[in-house]
Every structure is written in structure tokens, then in C-alpha cells.
């Protein structure tokens, strides 16, 4: 039995009187690939944003190796280097080159030397096939290339878990495949990932654990086989039927 990395317990989030997440419970172990699926507006992004501390949960706890991440002693930038995030819209630093995008966090947060940060960045840029573009600025790249740089930037922080929020939703269809391919490789390498996605074929293939969310709650969860081949709840069946 391996140690739990992240444990979400009774998590709730409200914006004003609008309750967005209610009593969310799940945990993540090393090498787990968890896919979160569900309709737009069901709270998937809010859940990931809470896990990355971009939003403050209203109730419940998120424990990282047993420590509540809302504890005031938690170093937030350091935590975010361990639980990294890849966004739908890339969120690259547009004024910096590809290489600088991948070194700046290592130098500022991890206090790595320029040389070490450079070497590490190159390793991950090669991994995602973006090494030839180190001197380019984000605006010179396609969406698929930007997202691969964003993945390299996140990997360069050597995260223990990487959160992906619809990483291919902003891409032209012909670029979706190249990003999913990189993510498949990461899964094969044993990276722990939580992926919000509408790419059902990908989720079915790659996920170990699938969470179906509806209206701010986990409606159903299970193995990829359980959710995709044998869903139990009407809401899950109805949602999945849209993709057939
Ligand atoms: P999903 O990612 O599943 O589409 P979101 O987490 O983005 O869902 O949104 C869930 C609900 O929370 C939506 O009704 C959305 O309008 C609301 N919401 C998200 N962020 C905020 C915010 N900062 N302030 C108020 N409401 C928000
Ligand atoms: Mg979303």
C-alpha cells in the first residue's frame, strides 16, 4: 500500500451565497492518473483551483502528505511547485522566451542556479518536443506548441502531482493529439496526474480513476472500466451518451 499524496476531505466552496462545491472527498496516491469529467459549470475548475490554492476552500480540508494546505505555515509558491497546474489557456509569460518560461520558476522558487535551471528546462523541453523553439516567444507558437511549453514549464518544477484543467479545450482540433500524446507519455512514465477533460477516449484509456461531477458534487466515481462501461447513475449515463 503506497502513501496517499493528496487527500480532499469534505471540501466545500461557495462564492457568496452560491454553493459551487459540496462535500467533495477523494484521494490521490503515487502514479494515479485521475480524470475528472462532467458538464460545464459542475465545478471541475473550481475544484482544481482549490487544490492549487488559486481559490480558498470554504469548508473541508485538502491534505498534502497529511498537512492541511490552508495552514498559514504552508509556503504557497513551494506547494504549487509540488502540485503544479496546466491551464486551458496556457498562462505562459508572453514577454519571456520559451526557455525563460521554463527557468524562471526554478530560479525564483526552487533557488536553482541559472545553469542548473537551464539544463533541467532543456531536458523537459526535449521531452515535449519543444527544444528547437527555446528562443521563441509564446506569440510565435501554435496553441499545441504553447501547451507543450506549459507542460515542460510545470515539469521543470519537478512536481509530485500535475493538475490539468482542460488542457486541450482551447486548441484547434489538429493540435489536440500532440498534447494528449505528451500526456500519455507522462502517464506511462508514472507521473501522478489529475486531469479535467472532455476527451473521453483519452480518459477511458489513460485514467486509473474517473470522477464524474455534476452540480458541485461527485455523482459517481470508479475505475475507468466502471465509469465508461458500466455507469450506475442516470446522470452519468446521460452525460456519457453525448459523446457516443
Ligand atoms: P467547470 O469547470 O466544471 O465548468 P467551474 O468550476 O468553472 O465549472 O464553475 C462552477 C460554477 O462556479 C459556475 O456556476 C461558475 O459560474 C461559478 N464560478 C466559478 N468561479 C467563480 C467566481 N470566481 N465567482 C463566482 N462564481 C464562480
Ligand atoms: Mg472548467
Image (cartoon, grey):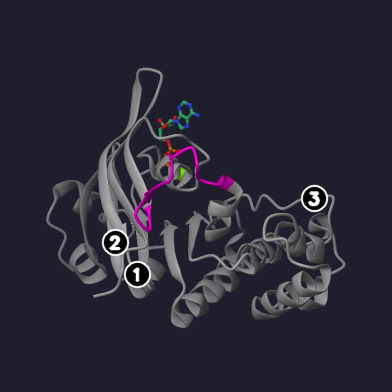
For disc 3, does the CB lie below 8 Å from ligand 2? no
Q: Is residue 72 magenta?
A: yes
Magenta residues, dominant SS class: loop
Residue reaching furthest to the left: 232
Q: Is residue 203 above or below residue 86?
A: below
For disc 2, does the CB lie below 8 Å from ligand 1? no
Q: Give the CA distance from mark 2 to mark 3.
A: 34 Å
Whether residues under marks 2 and 1 lie with C-beta atoms below 8 angstroms apart, the answer is yes
In this view of the protein, which residue sits in the foreground, 90 or 102? 102
Q: Which residue is mark 1?
A: 207
Q: Is residue 127 left or right of residue 1?
A: right
Give the image quadrant in which the ligand numbered 1 is located: top left
Q: Where does the image place residue 110, in percent across and percent down from the top left?
A: 67, 61
Secondary structure at numbered mark 2 = strand
Instruction: Tell me which segment is drawn in magenta.
Output: 64-76
Q: Which of disc 3 and disc 1 is earlier in sequence?
A: 3
Q: Which mark is residue 210?
A: 2
Q: Where does the image place residue 13, in percent across and percent down from the top left?
A: 36, 32
Instruction: Answer few, some or many: residues within 10 Å of disc 1's Cα (few below 14, many 20 plus, some between 14 and 19).
Output: many
Q: Is residue 153 left or right of residue 58?
A: right
- Residue at 36% over, 22% down: 18
In this view of the protein, which residue sits in the foreground, 97 or 169? 97
Q: Quadrant of residue 119?
A: bottom right
Residue reaching furthest to the top: 17
Q: Is residue 65 above or below residue 41?
A: below
Q: Which residue is mark 3?
A: 94
Q: Where does the image place residue 168, in percent across and percent down from the top left?
A: 54, 59
Q: Where does the image place residue 15, in percent across and percent down from the top left?
A: 42, 24
Q: Is residue 182 magenta?
A: no
Q: Give the CA distance from mark 2 to mark 1.
A: 6 Å
Question: Can I make out residue 86 in this image?
Answer: no
- Residue at 56% over, 66% down: 176
Amino acid at each position: 500500500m503506497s502513501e496517499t499524496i493528496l487527500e480532499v476531505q469534505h471540501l466545500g466552496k461557495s462564492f457568496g451565497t452560491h454553493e459551487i462545491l459540496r462535500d467533495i472527498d477523494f484521494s490521490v496516491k503515487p502514479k494515479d492518473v485521475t480524470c475528472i469529467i462532467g458538464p460545464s459549470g459542475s465545478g471541475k475548475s473550481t475544484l482544481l483551483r482549490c487544490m492549487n490554492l488559486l481559490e480558498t476552500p470554504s469548508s473541508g480540508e485538502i491534505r498534502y502528505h497529511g498537512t492541511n494546505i490552508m495552514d498559514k505555515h504552508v509556503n504557497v509558491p513551494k506547494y504549487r511547485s509540488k502540485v503544479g497546474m496546466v491551464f486551458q489557456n496556457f498562462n505562459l509569460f508572453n514577454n519571456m522566451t520559451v526557455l525563460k518560461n521554463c527557468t524562471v520558476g526554478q530560479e525564483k522558487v526552487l533557488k536553482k542556479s541559472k545553469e542548473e535551471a537551464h539544463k533541467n528546462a532543456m531536458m523537459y523541453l526535449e521531452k515535449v518536443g519543444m527544444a528547437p523553439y527555446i528562443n521563441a516567444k509564446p506569440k510565435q507558437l501554435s496553441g499545441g506548441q504553447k501547451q507543450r511549453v506549459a507542460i515542460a514549464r510545470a515539469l521543470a518544477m519537478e512536481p509530485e502531482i500535475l493538475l490539468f484543467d482542460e488542457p486541450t479545450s482551447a486548441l484547434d482540433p489538429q493540435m489536440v493529439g500532440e498534447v494528449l500524446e505528451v500526456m500519455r507519455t507522462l502517464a506511462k512514465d508514472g507521473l501522478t496526474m489529475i486531469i479535467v477533460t472532455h476527451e473521453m477516449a483519452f480518459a477511458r484509456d489513460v485514467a486509473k480513476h474517473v470522477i464524474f461531477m455534476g452540480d458541485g458534487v461527485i455523482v459517481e466515481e470508479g475505475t475507468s472500466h466502471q465509469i465508461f462501461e458500466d455507469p450506475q447513475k442516470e446522470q452519468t449515463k446521460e452525460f456519457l451518451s453525448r459523446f457516443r
